[in-house]
Image (cartoon, helix red, strand yellow):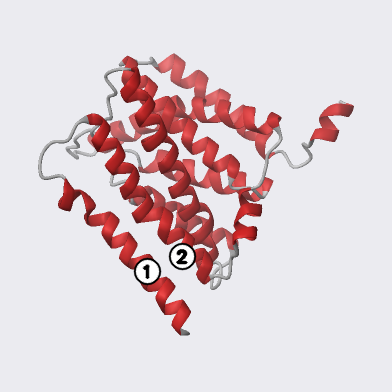
Protein backbone atom coordinates (compact mmCIF):
# COMPACT_ATOMS: atom_id res chain seq x y z
CA UNK A 1 0.00 0.00 0.00
CA UNK A 2 1.52 3.29 -1.10
CA UNK A 3 1.61 6.57 0.82
CA UNK A 4 -1.43 7.99 -0.99
CA UNK A 5 -3.53 4.95 -0.13
CA UNK A 6 -2.47 5.09 3.53
CA UNK A 7 -3.41 8.78 3.70
CA UNK A 8 -6.82 8.19 2.11
CA UNK A 9 -7.61 5.21 4.32
CA UNK A 10 -6.37 7.02 7.43
CA UNK A 11 -8.38 10.11 6.52
CA UNK A 12 -11.52 8.01 6.07
CA UNK A 13 -11.05 6.37 9.48
CA UNK A 14 -10.37 9.71 11.21
CA UNK A 15 -13.43 11.29 9.63
CA UNK A 16 -15.62 8.34 10.65
CA UNK A 17 -14.24 8.49 14.20
CA UNK A 18 -14.96 12.22 14.38
CA UNK A 19 -18.52 11.60 13.21
CA UNK A 20 -18.98 8.79 15.72
CA UNK A 21 -17.88 10.89 18.70
CA UNK A 22 -19.41 14.19 17.53
CA UNK A 23 -22.55 13.98 19.73
CA UNK A 24 -20.44 13.33 22.83
CA UNK A 25 -18.26 16.36 22.08
CA UNK A 26 -20.96 18.88 21.22
CA UNK A 27 -24.18 17.87 22.93
CA UNK A 28 -23.35 19.09 26.41
CA UNK A 29 -26.97 20.20 26.84
CA UNK A 30 -30.27 19.43 25.15
CA UNK A 31 -30.18 21.30 21.79
CA UNK A 32 -33.16 22.70 19.94
CA UNK A 33 -34.75 20.57 17.26
CA UNK A 34 -33.15 22.59 14.44
CA UNK A 35 -29.66 22.46 15.98
CA UNK A 36 -30.02 18.72 16.56
CA UNK A 37 -30.93 18.24 12.88
CA UNK A 38 -27.96 20.31 11.72
CA UNK A 39 -25.61 18.36 13.98
CA UNK A 40 -27.07 15.12 12.65
CA UNK A 41 -26.30 16.27 9.10
CA UNK A 42 -22.70 17.12 10.03
CA UNK A 43 -22.37 13.76 11.75
CA UNK A 44 -23.64 11.93 8.64
CA UNK A 45 -21.19 13.82 6.45
CA UNK A 46 -18.25 12.94 8.72
CA UNK A 47 -19.32 9.38 9.45
CA UNK A 48 -20.33 8.30 5.95
CA UNK A 49 -20.12 11.03 3.29
CA UNK A 50 -16.49 12.11 3.52
CA UNK A 51 -15.17 8.58 4.18
CA UNK A 52 -17.13 7.35 1.15
CA UNK A 53 -15.45 9.92 -1.07
CA UNK A 54 -12.02 8.96 0.28
CA UNK A 55 -12.68 5.25 -0.22
CA UNK A 56 -13.80 5.90 -3.78
CA UNK A 57 -10.60 7.86 -4.40
CA UNK A 58 -8.73 4.91 -2.93
CA UNK A 59 -10.42 2.69 -5.55
CA UNK A 60 -9.29 5.08 -8.28
CA UNK A 61 -12.55 6.95 -8.84
CA UNK A 62 -12.21 10.37 -10.46
CA UNK A 63 -14.67 13.25 -10.10
CA UNK A 64 -15.91 12.53 -13.63
CA UNK A 65 -16.54 8.86 -12.81
CA UNK A 66 -18.41 9.76 -9.63
CA UNK A 67 -20.56 12.21 -11.57
CA UNK A 68 -21.27 9.47 -14.09
CA UNK A 69 -22.33 7.06 -11.34
CA UNK A 70 -24.72 9.66 -9.96
CA UNK A 71 -26.12 9.81 -13.47
CA UNK A 72 -29.56 10.80 -14.66
CA UNK A 73 -32.86 8.98 -14.65
CA UNK A 74 -35.96 8.85 -16.80
CA UNK A 75 -38.84 10.82 -15.22
CA UNK A 76 -40.89 7.60 -15.37
CA UNK A 77 -38.42 5.88 -13.06
CA UNK A 78 -38.12 8.93 -10.82
CA UNK A 79 -41.88 8.84 -10.29
CA UNK A 80 -41.92 5.09 -9.69
CA UNK A 81 -39.08 5.45 -7.18
CA UNK A 82 -41.02 8.05 -5.20
CA UNK A 83 -44.12 5.83 -5.21
CA UNK A 84 -42.10 2.83 -4.05
CA UNK A 85 -40.42 4.87 -1.28
CA UNK A 86 -43.68 6.28 0.10
CA UNK A 87 -45.39 2.88 -0.03
CA UNK A 88 -42.42 1.18 1.61
CA UNK A 89 -42.74 3.55 4.55
CA UNK A 90 -45.91 1.73 5.63
CA UNK A 91 -44.85 -1.64 4.24
CA UNK A 92 -41.70 -1.37 6.37
CA UNK A 93 -43.81 -0.44 9.38
CA UNK A 94 -45.79 -3.65 8.84
CA UNK A 95 -42.60 -5.71 8.65
CA UNK A 96 -41.29 -4.03 11.80
CA UNK A 97 -44.57 -4.62 13.66
CA UNK A 98 -44.59 -8.32 12.74
CA UNK A 99 -40.95 -8.69 13.78
CA UNK A 100 -41.69 -6.93 17.07
CA UNK A 101 -44.55 -9.36 17.74
CA UNK A 102 -42.25 -12.29 16.95
CA UNK A 103 -39.51 -11.10 19.28
CA UNK A 104 -41.87 -10.31 22.16
CA UNK A 105 -43.55 -13.70 21.73
CA UNK A 106 -40.12 -15.24 22.34
CA UNK A 107 -39.94 -13.44 25.67
CA UNK A 108 -37.68 -10.56 24.66
CA UNK A 109 -38.38 -7.20 26.29
CA UNK A 110 -37.89 -4.49 23.71
CA UNK A 111 -38.12 -0.74 23.86
CA UNK A 112 -39.32 1.13 20.80
CA UNK A 113 -36.72 3.43 19.17
CA UNK A 114 -36.92 7.18 19.58
CA UNK A 115 -38.80 8.99 16.84
CA UNK A 116 -38.06 12.37 15.29
CA UNK A 117 -41.10 14.59 15.81
CA UNK A 118 -41.10 17.88 13.88
CA UNK A 119 -43.50 20.17 15.75
CA UNK A 120 -44.16 22.61 12.90
CA UNK A 121 -43.54 23.15 9.19
CA UNK A 122 -40.21 24.89 9.78
CA UNK A 123 -38.88 21.95 11.75
CA UNK A 124 -40.28 19.57 9.13
CA UNK A 125 -38.47 21.47 6.35
CA UNK A 126 -35.16 21.48 8.26
CA UNK A 127 -35.50 17.79 9.08
CA UNK A 128 -36.34 16.99 5.44
CA UNK A 129 -33.17 18.71 4.20
CA UNK A 130 -30.85 17.33 6.88
CA UNK A 131 -32.14 14.02 8.22
CA UNK A 132 -33.93 13.33 4.95
CA UNK A 133 -31.66 14.64 2.21
CA UNK A 134 -28.13 14.76 3.65
CA UNK A 135 -28.53 11.37 5.30
CA UNK A 136 -29.75 9.82 2.04
CA UNK A 137 -26.81 11.16 0.02
CA UNK A 138 -24.13 10.23 2.56
CA UNK A 139 -25.42 6.76 3.42
CA UNK A 140 -26.12 5.79 -0.19
CA UNK A 141 -22.66 6.90 -1.26
CA UNK A 142 -21.16 4.74 1.48
CA UNK A 143 -23.35 1.62 1.48
CA UNK A 144 -24.42 1.43 -2.16
CA UNK A 145 -21.24 2.64 -3.86
CA UNK A 146 -18.02 2.99 -1.81
CA UNK A 147 -18.33 -0.06 0.44
CA UNK A 148 -19.47 -2.46 -2.34
CA UNK A 149 -16.61 -1.18 -4.50
CA UNK A 150 -14.14 -1.82 -1.69
CA UNK A 151 -15.55 -5.27 -0.89
CA UNK A 152 -15.82 -6.08 -4.58
CA UNK A 153 -12.04 -6.20 -4.80
CA UNK A 154 -12.16 -9.54 -2.94
CA UNK A 155 -15.79 -10.70 -3.13
CA UNK A 156 -18.35 -11.15 -5.87
CA UNK A 157 -21.04 -8.53 -6.41
CA UNK A 158 -23.80 -10.36 -4.54
CA UNK A 159 -21.65 -11.01 -1.47
CA UNK A 160 -20.50 -7.38 -1.41
CA UNK A 161 -24.11 -6.16 -1.65
CA UNK A 162 -25.25 -8.51 1.11
CA UNK A 163 -22.48 -7.51 3.51
CA UNK A 164 -23.08 -3.82 2.78
CA UNK A 165 -26.80 -4.28 3.42
CA UNK A 166 -26.20 -6.04 6.74
CA UNK A 167 -23.80 -3.31 7.87
CA UNK A 168 -26.31 -0.66 6.79
CA UNK A 169 -29.00 -2.28 8.94
CA UNK A 170 -26.73 -2.80 11.94
CA UNK A 171 -25.41 0.78 11.85
CA UNK A 172 -28.91 2.06 12.66
CA UNK A 173 -28.82 0.29 16.07
CA UNK A 174 -32.50 -0.59 15.83
CA UNK A 175 -33.18 -4.27 16.49
CA UNK A 176 -36.87 -4.03 15.55
CA UNK A 177 -36.04 -2.32 12.29
CA UNK A 178 -33.37 -4.77 11.08
CA UNK A 179 -35.59 -6.77 8.65
CA UNK A 180 -37.08 -3.55 7.23
CA UNK A 181 -33.63 -2.01 6.77
CA UNK A 182 -32.12 -5.12 5.17
CA UNK A 183 -34.94 -5.29 2.60
CA UNK A 184 -34.56 -1.54 2.08
CA UNK A 185 -30.82 -1.90 1.44
CA UNK A 186 -31.10 -4.93 -0.84
CA UNK A 187 -33.74 -3.18 -2.92
CA UNK A 188 -31.53 -0.08 -3.19
CA UNK A 189 -28.66 -2.29 -4.40
CA UNK A 190 -30.91 -3.90 -7.02
CA UNK A 191 -32.14 -0.48 -8.09
CA UNK A 192 -28.61 0.74 -8.64
CA UNK A 193 -27.53 -2.44 -10.41
CA UNK A 194 -30.55 -2.28 -12.72
CA UNK A 195 -30.22 1.39 -13.68
CA UNK A 196 -26.49 1.95 -13.17
CA UNK A 197 -27.11 5.18 -11.28
CA UNK A 198 -26.90 6.18 -7.63
CA UNK A 199 -29.54 8.84 -8.17
CA UNK A 200 -32.53 6.50 -7.79
CA UNK A 201 -31.33 4.89 -4.52
CA UNK A 202 -30.68 8.39 -3.13
CA UNK A 203 -34.18 9.50 -4.14
CA UNK A 204 -35.71 6.33 -2.68
CA UNK A 205 -33.86 6.87 0.60
CA UNK A 206 -34.70 10.58 0.80
CA UNK A 207 -38.41 10.06 0.07
CA UNK A 208 -38.58 7.21 2.58
CA UNK A 209 -37.05 9.43 5.27
CA UNK A 210 -39.32 12.33 4.34
CA UNK A 211 -42.43 10.13 4.48
CA UNK A 212 -41.53 9.01 7.99
CA UNK A 213 -40.98 12.62 9.06
CA UNK A 214 -44.37 13.65 7.67
CA UNK A 215 -46.09 10.77 9.45
CA UNK A 216 -44.39 11.70 12.71
CA UNK A 217 -45.28 15.37 12.24
CA UNK A 218 -48.94 14.46 11.68
CA UNK A 219 -48.80 11.79 14.41
CA UNK A 220 -50.41 9.44 11.93
CA UNK A 221 -51.26 5.92 13.01
CA UNK A 222 -52.12 3.91 9.87
CA UNK A 223 -54.08 0.72 10.30
CA UNK A 224 -53.21 -2.81 9.25
CA UNK A 225 -55.28 -2.53 6.06
CA UNK A 226 -53.41 0.55 4.88
CA UNK A 227 -50.06 -1.09 5.64
CA UNK A 228 -51.09 -4.16 3.64
CA UNK A 229 -52.24 -2.01 0.73
CA UNK A 230 -48.92 -0.14 0.71
CA UNK A 231 -47.03 -3.43 0.81
CA UNK A 232 -48.82 -4.47 -2.38
CA UNK A 233 -48.16 -1.08 -3.97
CA UNK A 234 -44.47 -1.36 -3.11
CA UNK A 235 -44.21 -4.82 -4.67
CA UNK A 236 -45.89 -3.57 -7.85
CA UNK A 237 -43.75 -0.42 -8.18
CA UNK A 238 -40.58 -2.36 -7.33
CA UNK A 239 -41.29 -4.90 -10.06
CA UNK A 240 -41.79 -2.11 -12.59
CA UNK A 241 -38.56 -0.44 -11.49
CA UNK A 242 -36.55 -3.64 -11.79
CA UNK A 243 -38.15 -4.92 -14.99
CA UNK A 244 -35.28 -5.50 -17.40
CA UNK A 245 -36.84 -4.51 -20.71
CA UNK A 246 -38.40 -1.24 -19.56
CA UNK A 247 -37.03 1.84 -21.27
CA UNK A 248 -38.41 5.00 -22.78
CA UNK A 249 -38.57 3.57 -26.31
CA UNK A 250 -40.44 0.48 -25.16
CA UNK A 251 -43.06 2.56 -23.36
CA UNK A 252 -43.51 4.74 -26.46
CA UNK A 253 -44.29 1.71 -28.63
CA UNK A 254 -46.70 0.13 -26.12
Picture layout, residue 154 above or below residue 93:
below
Picture layout, residue 65 above or below residue 92:
below
Count of residue discs? 2
Horizontal arrangement in the rendering, residue 26 relative to residue 213 (left or right)? left
Query: Can the viewer see residue 227 in this picture?
Result: yes
Which percent across, then down, holds residue 242?
67, 40
**Which residue is painted at 35% across and 29% down in the image?**
126
Picture layout, residue 162 above or below residue 185:
below
Residue furthest to the right: 253
Which percent across, then down, holds residue 219?
30, 16
Helix, strand or loop status at disc 2: helix
**To which residue does mark 2 refer?**
54
Query: Image quadrant of residue 11?
Result: bottom left
Q: Quadrant of the C terminus?
A: top right
Q: Are marks 1 and 2 in contact (CB under 8 Å)?
A: yes
Badge 1 crowding class, 10 Å Cα cut-off, few under 14, some 14 to 19, many 20 or more, is some
Badge 2 crowding class, 10 Å Cα cut-off, few under 14, some 14 to 19, many 20 or more, is many
Horizontal arrangement in the rendering, residue 169 relative to residue 80 (left or right)? left
Q: Nearer the viewer, residue 122 or 77?
A: 122
**To which residue does mark 1 refer?**
11
Q: Nearer the viewer, residue 29 or 151?
A: 29
Helix, strand or loop status at disc 1: helix
Query: Image quadrant of residue 201?
Result: top right
Amino acid sequence: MNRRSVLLLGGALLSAAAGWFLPHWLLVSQPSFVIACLLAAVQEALLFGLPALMLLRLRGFTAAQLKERLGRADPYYLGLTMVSAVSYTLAGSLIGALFYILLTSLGLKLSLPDVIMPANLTELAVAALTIGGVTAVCEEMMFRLALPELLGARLNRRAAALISSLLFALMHFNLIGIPTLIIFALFAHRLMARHGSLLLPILFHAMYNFSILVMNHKEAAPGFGMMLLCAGLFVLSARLLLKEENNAADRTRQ
